Amino acid sequence: MLKIIKPGLLSTIQDLGRHGYQKFGVIASGVMDPLAHRIANLLVGNDEDAATLEITLAGPVILFEKDALISLCGGDLSPAIDGKSVRMWRTIFVKKGSKLQFGAHQSGCRTYLSIAGGFKVPEIMDSSSTYLRAEIGGFHGRALKADDRLETNLMTDLSKVIMEALIPDTDEPFGDIGWSITSSISPFLSGESTIQVIPGRQFHLFTKESKQNLFKESYDVSPQSDRMGYRLQGAKLSLSEPEDLISEAVAFGSIQVPPDGNPIVLLADRQTTGGYPKIGQIASVDMSLIAQAKPGDSLSFKKITVEAAQQLYLEQENNIQQLKQGIRLKFKSG
């Protein structure tokens, strides 16, 4: 069991989302950075969809009330256990009675804490994700508060093997696995900063200048951004002629343009439909880049074809499957 000593700025339980209910007006929600979430789970022997703790910018202080196997992936918020720095993107054994806390922001915006077994919370519509506006899912439908206690599910057999291998024979409060994730698996880890975008369904309706500006100018993430969407500030985008559009389904990463000309990138807590024209769609492989951007950060976009985006997606999935297989073989063979 984990006890929350301090909750941090925004710490919520999330998984890969509440899919299959958008036709009823229920949003998908889920993690902002699916890649970091999936890798965090694989490192502790969980299924990729197990619930993790999404930690935003200012992290919590967490007391481990029993031994635990965890990983921390995503943005670097200077994690430390009992005052000693913890390396990210690797498996970590934490001793009972130790405290995890976070310090100065180093990179990114969101860290994912995965624990062997996954967090034990009720599933609402087949998902453990917290949807704050509707107050459903996760831990009582809300962000964590001080004195909350989080339980975990039973560990998988793989988690038990990994944990046994990592128990330190010293007085140190934790021990880690000694190896980490290769930077080739994520554009965020490899330091890429340009986000690849496929022209959207209404791309052709925008002026020539707007089409050029999207891929030539940079855009700043405004302070009015949240899990629903990032409002961007930069060169204004406009249609060639006024158009009356019928609302239609929107996706994670759709870039829509309201009448004021400032684009909005729709994210995890996006609405189910939208009537603003969509000038672009962020490639799935670059969702980590947008999810790890914070207010004030500058974003640049690069045009990419559907076929190229699909190829990159397949390569990324292949890397994840190799990682998954590698972890199984490593601990199966000892």
Image: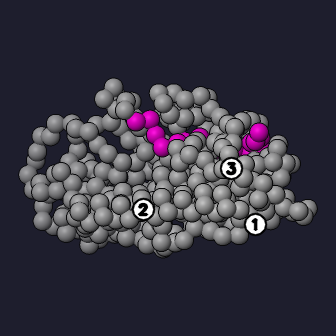
Residue 70 is left or right of residue 220, and the answer is: right
Q: Which residue is mark 3?
A: 159
Residue 215 is left or right of residue 243, and the answer is: right
For the N terminus, the image quarter is top right
Residue 12 within the magenta-colored segment of the rendering: yes
Q: Residues within 10 Å of mark 1 (few under 14, many from 20)?
A: some
Q: Nearer the viewer, residue 5 or 150?
A: 150
* Residue 137: x %, y % from top left: 54, 31
Q: Which residues are magenta?
A: 1-19
Q: Nearer the viewer, residue 227 or 126?
A: 126
Amino acid type of the residue tagged 3 in the rendering: Ser
Q: Whole-Å distance between the Cαs marked 1 and 3?
A: 23 Å
Q: Which residue is mark 2?
A: 318
Q: Whole-Å distance between the Cαs marked 3 and 2?
A: 22 Å
Is any part of residue 292 visible from this angle? no
Residue 292 within the magenta-colored segment of the rendering: no
Q: Return the disc, 1 or 3, that comes first in the chain's sequence.
A: 1
Q: Residues within 10 Å of mark 3 (few under 14, many from 20)?
A: many
Compared to residue 277, the image places residue 142 above or below, namely above
Amino acid type of the residue tagged 1 in the rendering: Ser
Q: Which residue is mark 1?
A: 85
